[in-house]
Amino acid sequence: MGSITRRSFLQTSATAALAFGGAAALGQTGANARSNFVLLMSDEHNPKVSSIHGHPLVHTPNLERLAAQGTVFESTYCPSPLCMPCRSAFMSGRRVHDIQCYNNCNVIPFEYPSYGQVLREQGVHTVQIGKVDVYRPGAGLGFSEMLMPGDRTPPGDENICREPLAIRADGATRADGFGPAEGNPFAGDDRAVDAALEWLATRPAQLSQPWVLVVQVVKPHFPHVVTQELWDQYADGADLPAYGRDVASANHPYARDLRDHFQTDLFTDEQIKGLRRGYLGCVEHVDWQLGRIMEALHTHGLAATTTLAYTSDHGDMLGKFGMWWKCSLYEDSARVPLVVAGPGFTPGARVRTPVDLHDLRAAIFDATGAAQPDGWLGRSLRALKAGDPERCVFSEYHGHGTRSGAYLIRKGDWKLHYCMKAPHQLFNLAEDPEELNNLAEANPGKLRELEEALRAVCSPEEENNRAHAFERRQLAAIEQMKSATPAT
């Protein structure tokens, strides 16, 4: 972008954003029209922190423009609120417990086919740029092009023990991960989007088949370090969460576990304020990258033949209930933003029907005219009812920081956290969007209804036992790997 500022770029990109409304795709029109597909996926974006969801401070004009020309899915959940499990499930089309990618440890790799490979084998040109972080290295995933793959170095996270619960030695020091930085704190994301813009400028004209471009950026993931310009802009964002450590939901055993695991009770008020302030700047940075992609699609005449989607892999608690980052089934952690514009997506629409990231991947197959393999999850977003009170979505967590597994079922306004070694939690999100009042004891009938929906997906007991057993295998493999590595 040279010397162009974010502000001036946002002004020049306003016209480009208007190009997505009512676009015809590959010579077709209507809800079943085919198109190319661009997906921008960020990391750790709490959906409540955007102007399209009513945040009073954060500046996300490109999300607003994309929402005006497409559909906002207001109740979108990740397969698991942790990077590697979520991304692995999305990549493979299967549940986290099915593929056994439970945590951020990759000492034991897997060979599942990826959606990039499956699409390529059906004649769709597939491109992935940036962070990968799944069950095997990006180079082996079978995409047509894999650019700048960001793979986790084996064995990955070693702090995965839950029996007894591991405590991160660096937890308290993370509280200083905020503030203005010298130089460019977003250099990695800039390089990834630069590569995407170069690809859009050259490769589509050379292709005779539909294509899918997936661009991965790391922000707003911790640390919340930003430019001086963005730091100054969000001085009013240096606040404390509305709901802290004193409410009941903050003291559920799993919440207490996570607070202990990350040592977040040691964070001072000033550190909490700084982290929250920096996060707003990180979110605006991601919005700016979205605007760059929208501008490129417009400039190169691709907007009319391309569906564009924005989402994230999970959210961030941002100090709510004394908790930080992800790893929880609370809304701020397990829910993600999702906006899609293109054929079959009604401009300006907002859909409350619960969906998950498998439905987004199914939409990629649908848009390009490809077929998902038998047994893969998800129903194309274009085929979903806008208001379906019977639809259930599922998420699960078996990763670091809690003593045992938990499962999420969302159906209509109701949401169940089915906890294997702690009391279950039941929330009515229409009446209690902040999840302050556990209604499990007061509503046994609704609890049974949602538990039945859970058991239609899996046996929570069996899958919890499998997860603990696999974790023990991983810990043994880590020790074996260390013993085989010569001391330096």
Image (cartoon, grey):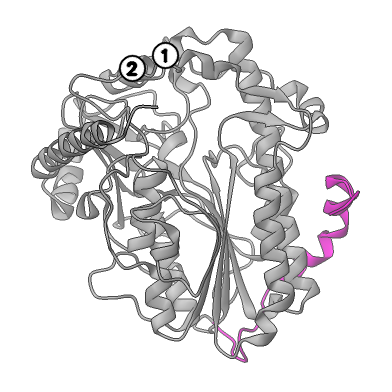
Residue at the spot 14% in from the left edge and 39% down from the top edge = 464
Instruction: Return the residue nearer the eye: 293 or 307.
Output: 293
* SS label for mark 2: loop
Rendered position, 318 above or below 265 = below
Mark 2: few/some/many CA within 10 Å (<14, 14-19, 20+) = many
Vertical comparison of 111 with 322: above or below: below
Q: Are marks 2 and 1 in contact (CB under 8 Å)?
A: yes
Of 206 and 371, nearer the camera is 206
Answer above or below: position of 73 versus 385.
Answer: above
Residue 94 shows up from this direction: yes
Residue at 33% from the left image edge and 75% from the top image edge: 372
| Label 1 SS | loop
- Pinpoint residue 140: horizontal percent, then vertical percent: 39, 65
Chain part drawn in magenta: 1-30
Distance CA(mark 2)–CA(mark 1) = 8 Å
Viewer-side residue, 305 vs 285: 285
Q: In this view, does 452 lie to the left or right of 382?
A: left
Quarter location, residue 440 = top left
Does residue 248 appear anywhere in the picture? Answer: no
Q: Which mark is residue 236?
A: none
Who's the residue at 39% across and 28% down the image?
435
Which residue has dot 1 on it? 263
**Residue 413 location, x and y as percent?**
36, 44
Q: Which of marks 2 and 1 is nearer the N terminus?
A: 2
